[in-house]
Image (spheres, grey):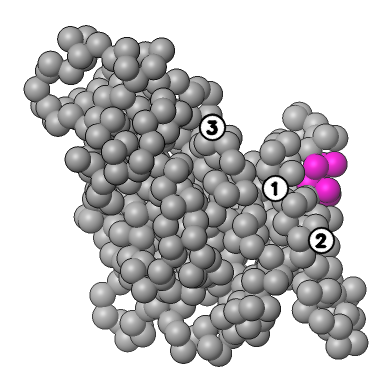
Amino acid sequence: MRRIIFKNFRIIDAAADFFGSLIIEDGIIAKIIPHKAPSEANDDNAHNACGMIINGADFLPQRGVTEDAAYPALMPAFIDLHAHFRDTGSVGGGAPFPAETVESACLAATAGGFGTVVCMANTKPVIDTVEKAYALKQRSDALGLIDLYPVISLTKNMDGRELTCIPDNAPYRPLLLSEDGKDVYDDALFLAAMEQAARLGIPVSCHCDCGGHEAEAAKAAGRPRTEWSRIEENNAVRRAIELGKRAACHVHIAHVSTKEAAAVIRNEKKSANATTGFTLTCEATPHHIAANEEDARRMGETAHGRVNPPLRGEADRLAIIEALRDGTIDAIATDHAPHSEADKSSGAPGFSGLETAFAACLAAMGDLRQLSALMSAAPARIIGIDRGANARGRIAPGLRADLIIADSYAKWNVDASRFFSRGVCTPFAGKTLQGKILMTVHKGRIVFDGGGNA
């Protein structure tokens, strides 16, 4: 029997924050023993059984703190609804060597505290069949580091002309469908894709950059990207919601970044009618939570600081944080988008985000329990892995042991050259962040150990 005993931790998830100990047996959370304080832990109650013992108290001397609140947190592993792994998982075929590989991305995920990741389909070649998605998942499964769920694109080759077909009895069932990287611009085709998703019971993640004539006119008039991209996002969010209502499907809005888009979503949720079959959820990214347009200017707006949607003004950043706090925005997702240095220098949009997500979001949000809700419980609910034998996102007896040890006191300097990810562009490079992942446990097995355990 494989047993790990976590002794003297703050046990935190979306519903709880208490001191206690936890026992894993054969990959499952077998027992949780609450204590009023770490000093009241009863060794005879839980810790005499054979197995590896990891004691939260052993981390304290290295941190220079001893008060109860400073004990490290034992939390559910994070679930990322939106990442780009670049690698199709295929061998040969003439595809260029990607800016990220399955191996490097999975390692980066474990270092960032992620146990489950949904990766997007805009690879080369595009993941537009069940077979391609399943092959990538199998390659990740063989590593045993995370659970990877590849997205299947809405249209073949993501060219916006022909609907991708997903059989009802397919050997692999994606947890999201998306054309991420761009919108489906034809309304009839987008509606048909949403109707197929509704029939399959799979949410559609919407990139939201189809701004219609208003956005095109702003571009033609030479207005700056900060203006026309705002029009694109705001109009595209409204469009996705209206089409989603017609299709009676689950629409998930990716990387919300403007105060107007957040307001549209808030108002829509307030007026939602549960009987229509339409569901609306959304996400925000760590970089839109913890960085703004000044960071983009510092990095170079047309190259290293370029991301879709762009980093916005401070008023937008604060509006996104407020929308996360009041439940308008359901989840945090990294939009991890690694690129080679040459591609970034040429203006490829995107940042590497898996390994900085926790610290960046902790700085902005502050509350570990709310952060667990946004990065674990809510993502699990959105993609339907919050129930059943493999339920994730919470801590409770009988659930799978996907866990992290997080130190909310640890300060560290972001040195992207030390990332596991092959992509090293981040708006947090050179900054000192507070909050660090010390350990990641996947299915009851330690897959990342960042050190610090005496």
Disc 3/disc 2 C-alpha distance (Å):
30 Å
| Residue drawn at the location 59% of the way across and 84% of the way down | 303
Is residue 210 visible to the viewer in this orientation of the structure?
no
Residue at the far front: name it: 64
Question: Which picture quadrant has residue 183?
Answer: bottom right
Residue 145 in picture, x, y percent from top left: 27, 51
Was residue 265 drawn as part of the magenta stretch in this picture? yes
| Residue drawn at the location 23% of the way across and 56% of the way down | 143
Residue 255 in picture, x, y percent from top left: 65, 58
Relative to 223, is 144 on the left or the right? left
Was residue 406 drawn as part of the magenta stretch in this picture? no
Disc 3/disc 1 C-alpha distance (Å):
15 Å
Which portion, as a residue range, is magenta? Answer: 263-268
Choose the circle earlier in sequence order: 1 or 2: 2
**Residue bearing mark 2:** 234
- Which label is found at residue 369? 3
Under tag 3, what secondary structure?
helix
| Residue drawn at the location 49% of the way across and 86% of the way down | 343
**Residue bearing mark 1:** 321
Choose the circle earlier in sequence order: 3 or 2: 2
- Label 1 amino acid? Ile
Q: Is residue 128 above or below residue 304?
A: above
Question: As rendered, which of 376 and 213 lies closer to the eye?
Answer: 376
Relative to 138, is 379 on the left or the right? right
Residue 73 in picture, x, y percent from top left: 40, 34
Q: Main secondary structure of the magenta part?
A: helix
Q: Nearer the viewer, mark 3 or mark 2?
A: 3
**Quarter containing the C terminus:** top left
Under tag 1, what secondary structure?
helix
- Which label is found at residue 300? none
Under tag 2, what secondary structure?
helix
